[in-house]
Amino acid sequence: MRYSGLKVITEGLFGNKGWTPAWRDPAPKAEYDAIIIGGGGHGLATAFYLAKNHGLTNIAVLEKSHIGSGNIGRNTTIVRANYFLPGNSEFYSHSLKLWEQMESELNYNVMHSQRGLINLFHSDGQRDAFVRRGNAMINQGDDAILLDREGVREHLPYLDFEQTRFPIYGGLLHPRGGSARHDAVAWGYARGADQRGVDLIQNCEVTGIDIANGKVVGVQTTRGAIRAKKVGIIVAGRSSQVAAMAGMRLPIESHILQAFVTEGLKPVINHVVSFGMGHFYISQSDKGGLVFGGDLDFYASYASRGNLPMVEHVMEAGMTLMPMIGRAKVLRSWGGIMDMSPDGSPIIDKTHIDGLFVDCGWNYGGFKAVPASGWCMAHLMATGESHEVAKMFRLDRFATGHLLDEEGTGSQHNLH
Amino acid sequence: MRLKCPLCGDRDRREFYYYGAEDYLHRPAEGAPLADWDNYLHLRDNPAGVTKDLWYHEQGCAQWLVVTRNTVTHEISGVELVAERKA
């Protein structure tokens, strides 16, 4: 069923009885050409582009819970392409271009809003670094505008410009940055993949990966064994557990990142604002809630909830930057499980097992990468070769020393 | 979360610095193959369950600690001094 404004009106006139489920609920077949483990944003996008770009439709997405129940439904929905390093820059640039065509490509409203992202800086040295970053973004073909203090004030008059600890010197504006409706991204890709014949199999947990003579031959699941010569592990948050089924040890440590939402307010914050020195970022959802977060809790955890010291730190940083939000009431907070890699960059690569591919290590930046990750993982699984914009995301780069340390903070999982 | 330091007693999490998995205690010998260094520095079991990791009592006794804890429940079942572990 194609969605349109006319469809909404006609359905409204006739009691909304004509809507059908957005995707089927098929039983797993005994064999597929390819299996995607993980029905999150990245897995669904991979399935969609395998079908759309490579004509591979005899594939299944296996999800242990329901579609979109993992990190794709538990993030702060920022979309941006403001990376600096070669390897990251072209990948996120490609991703932003895919975001800009996503709604027409999927015939689905993901509420992508390019409201502009402003990264604040607070010293001469930080300004120099942001000038350099902005030039890298422009060289990549994306947009960046350096704002001085008064320029920031025009956009964000509500900041505390008088604070002494981190005086605001200016900001780097990325006009094409913004946010989107996270669940809709999962649903849009799920519907698009289903329409192209992909089987989305929910409540189907993978319990084993079958390997014979160095080649993957299928998976064991709670709904029986399924054969396939190609298997993609796309389960950020649980990557180490699933990879262990294939006898692999990944360069991943799982950490908790907390996020917070306030009660709904009238429009007050029109951009995405990041305050790196205070480890704080914020935007306002279309429902009106202020959505904000900070840094990791800094120790390995799978608890899906954080600890109070980081809650306190995030609130303090927010109050330092924009005292007005002290009047808002926090409705809820949660913790997402992050695949932290030693250099803070992701992995999209084949493994030493023939036919087994892995897409993981998204740290706390996986949401904006959903379309390009799917695009590049599909390319890798279909052709056996890394896509041009993802060729640096190698699994073995830590052993070979080809790190992608965007922040320059060192080779330790919790430093990024 | 609180950690029970063997020297200082029950202390707030904020007094401690988290370094990473206990793997950091098993430094390869000089001249070991590159794969051993990769294993030591980067590759992790990363269990969802009981794990052992290294913490430093930065604002206390300045001792390195091996903490046995559950990554799913945050329950802590043991804290010992690295200095007192037998090699």
Image: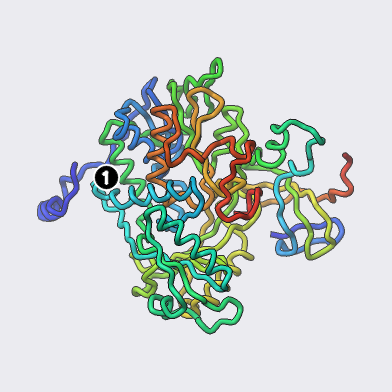
- Quadrant in the picture for the N terminus of chain A: top left
Mark 1 secondary-structure assignment: helix
Quarter that holds the C terminus of chain A: bottom right
Q: Nearer the viewer, residue A116 or B23?
A: A116
Above/below status of B85 relative to B32: below
Q: Is residue A368 left or right of residue A304?
A: left
Decide which of A328, A132 is in the foreground and name it: A132
Which residue is denoted by mark 1 in the rendering? Answer: A106
Residue A203 visible in the displayed image: no
Q: Could you say where residue B40 lies in the image, as x and y percent from the top left? A: 72, 39
Q: Position of residue A379 (x, y in %)?
A: 39, 33
**Mark 1: few/some/many CA within 10 Å (<14, 14-19, 20+):** many
Residue depicted at 24% across the width and 48% down the height: A104
Q: Position of residue A260 (x, y in %)?
A: 49, 64
State the image coordinates of residue A317 (x, y, percent, origin top left). 56, 72
Q: Quadrant of residue A352?
A: top right
Image: A181 above or below B25: below
Q: Residue furthest top?
A: A213
What residue do we see at 12% from left, 55% from top? A9
- Answer with left or right where residue A83 lies relative to residue A398: left
Residue at left 23%, top 47%?
A107
Above or below for A359 versus B61: above
